[in-house]
Image (cartoon, rainbow, N blue to C red):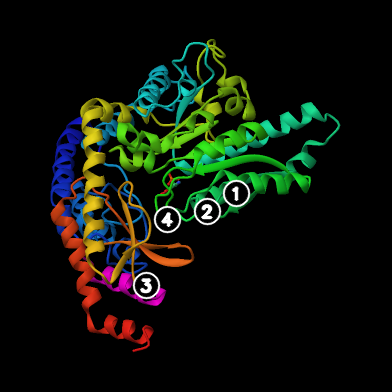
Amino acid sequence: MTNSADFRQWGKEMVDYIADYLDNIADRPPLSQVEPGYLRKLIPEEAPHYPDKWQDVFADIERIIMPGVTHWHSPHFHSYFPTGNSYAAILGDMLSDAIGCIGFSWISSPACTELEMVTLDWLGKMLRLPDSFLSCTEGGQGGGVIQGTASESTVMALLSAKMRSIRQYKALQPERDQYEIMSKLVAYTSEYAHSSVERASLISSVKMRMLPCDDKYALRGETLAKAIQEDKAEGLIPAFVCATIGTTPSCAFDNLEEIGPICEAEKVWLHVDAAYAGTALICPEFRSLANGIELADSFNFNPHKWMRVNFDCSAMWVRNQTDLVGAFQVDPTYLKHEHEGKVVDYRHWHIPLGRRFRSLKLWFVLRLFGVSQLQEHIRKQVNLAHEFEALVRKDARFEIVADVVLGLVCFRLKGTDVENEELLRRVTKTGKVFLVGSHLNKQFVIRFAVCAPQTTSEDIHYAWNAITEETNSPLLNGITNVSNGK
Ligand SMILES: Cc1ncc(COP(=O)(O)O)c(C=O)c1O
């Protein structure tokens, strides 16, 4: 492709292809059916020396790529948590790709920095975050940044907490060696926190304790306070807590109102991971799920999960920018500019130097949906989850194992793990719907997440039928009978 005439024509073909793909996505199996290594067999061993024809490339999308795609936006995809998608965000990404700037500092593309600050203030207000998180707050120290993922936000929060704790301890006991202090730091999270939290501790070399939860799978203040006291008695230094709003296994909510005051009293950094559930806070009826957020040092959620923004767009706010920015400053001459110090230079806010113009897709989504349509989307999906929950509750063979608050339903056959694992395996094998399992209270449970915006009540019934058909199948009955001792 060498000229804009080709781009205009091929671009239109691609737009049509994308619209057809998304219009008819329900006709494709949600989970890819290929075997490992399928793709190499379909592709030449070397890149073409001379340009291929567009028509050939275009034809290979269906021939080579689509068989190996798991269709996250299918209304029969009920795995993990949703990932965002919308035409508004795709258009924003197209423009970002065309501009192709690398917005590491204000001067490297002022709109890239300023639109990010403004859209994150908009977003913070939509979620009713405390003013102390917003960059528009007069005299405030807060601010927001778009990270690639929630995992990166947790790593940044933990690394910043580590540096802050070292500073705090050096101020009290200047004779102590910083590496000795570092070896004593300890972080806390719940046993149901996302695996990325444990990973953040490995990356930042801070020991992490995974604390037990209550019967709602939530971390409580009392448990945290006890762990902190134990560790202090051992000469360790509590530095960081990651609480979750909407845990991955069951969408549980750690008790921020109990955890926040403990962190404040102990000078421990509180990070709140609301990767999935954060979007629901734009609905006033769900805002109380974040009660206690005022005492958090940092907060993160993924518009790229539930807010119709395509991956990657993970919004993170901090109450005190200098904790983040001051922790990892390096200043080579080639990155200096005349407005430094008076403007935000996002290169100090995350790990990579380079950054895309991600706020464009967020801006497009916020403007082209408006808050009202985004709220509608959340409410519709929560209602669909309750519809699925009602179907499960009506069938005496099954039980619901966690409160259904947002778009996730955790359920299981009243039986053994073996039966539940077998049921999930069989349902997956049908290719009709795609769900995954998780463990709660050491028991295997099946997760049903409402994911695609296209999902309707009919799709909920379709999924439930796919599950009950397999439950009724003779072989599974056999397993059930065996495990029941019949
Ligand atoms: C609660 C929670 N935190 C973090 C993550 C990781 O998100 P990311 O892929 O943006 O790092 C997930 C992913 O589902 C999640 O559910």
N-term mark: 2 or 1: 2
In this view, the residue in front, 290 or 364, is: 290
In this view, the residue in front, 428 or 96, is: 428
> Residue sitting at 21 percent across and 70 percent down?
468
Mark 2 vs 1: CB contact within 8 A: yes
Magenta stretch, residue numbers: 415-433
Q: Quadrant of residue 155?
A: top right
The amino acid type of the residue labelled 1 equals Thr
The amino acid type of the residue labelled 2 equals Cys
Please state the horizontal and vertical placement of residue 12, each as a whole percent of the image. 15, 37
Specify whether residue 419 is painted magenta: yes
| Label 3 crowd bin: few (<14), some (14–19), many (20+), radius 10 Å | some
Q: Which residue is mark 1?
A: 223
> Residue sitting at 52 percent across and 48 percent down?
219
Q: Which residue is mark 3?
A: 421
Mark 4 vs 3: CB contact within 8 A: no
Label 4 C-beta lies within 8 Å of the nearest ligand 1 atom: no
Q: Quadrant of residue 97?
A: top left
Q: Which residue is mark 2?
A: 213
Q: Is residue 100 above or below residue 202?
A: above
In the rendered structure, the answer to whether residue 61 lies left or right of residue 343 reads: left
Specify whether residue 404 is painted magenta: no
Label 1's element? helix
**Count of number-bearing discs:** 4
N-term mark: 1 or 3: 1
N-term mark: 3 or 2: 2
Separation of residues labelled 3 and 2 (CA atoms): 24 Å
Q: Which residue is mark 4?
A: 249
